[in-house]
Amino acid sequence: MEKRPLMAEKYITISIIIVFSTNEVMEIDCVLNFGTEDNDIISALLLNVIFNSLLKHYDFYKEDNMQGT
């Protein structure tokens, strides 16, 4: 059985702070760990969840503002 060479683990820290015009603050802190196949998959899925959540929140906020006009 062939052994895979060890890969150096890499950590990425993401801090996203969004301030809306209503002074609502949304903050996301996340540490992603890359370097092994499992961690790469989990980190990629987590990034996907973060950005999809931001997009959904933005769409909801935008629709809410449009109804007020």
Image (cartoon, helix red, strand yellow):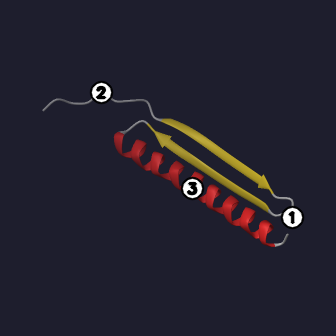
Check the image and report above or below for 58 versus 2. below
The image shows a total of numbered marks equal to 3
* Left or right of 19 on screen, residue 39: left
Looking at the rendered structure, the secondary structure element under dot 1 is: loop
Q: Pinpoint residue 21: horizontal percent, then vertical percent.
A: 86, 59
Q: Nearer the viewer, residue 39 or 18?
A: 18
* Element type where label 2 sits in the image: loop
Residue 49 place in picture, x, y as percent: 53, 56
49 above or below 31? below
Would you say the residues marked 2 and 1 are in contact, meaning their CB atoms lie under 8 Å apart?
no
Task: Give the residue type that dot 3 points to.
Answer: Asn
Q: In front: 30, or 52?
A: 52
Query: Gap between marks 1 and 3, in whole Å?
Result: 22 Å
* Quadrant of the image containing the C terminus: bottom right
Mark 2 vs mark 1: which is more N-terminal? 2
Q: Secondary structure at mark 3?
A: helix
Q: Residues within 10 Å of mark 3 (few under 14, many from 20)?
A: few
Q: Amino acid at mark 1?
A: Thr
Q: Where residue 6 sits in the image (x, y, percent)? A: 34, 30
Residue under the point 75% across and 51% down: 17
Outermost residue, left direction? 1
Label 1 vs 3, first from the N-terminus: 1
What mark, if any, has residue 5 been given in the picture? 2
Q: CA distance from mark 3 to mark 2?
A: 34 Å
The label number, if any, that marks residue 52 in the structure image: 3
Residue under the point 37% across and 38% down: 36
Query: Callout 1 environment at 10 Å: few (<14), some (14 to 19), or many (20+)?
Result: few
Q: Residue at x 78, y 72 (%)?
A: 67
Instruction: Point out which mark residue 22 bears.
Output: 1
Front residue of 14 and 57: 57
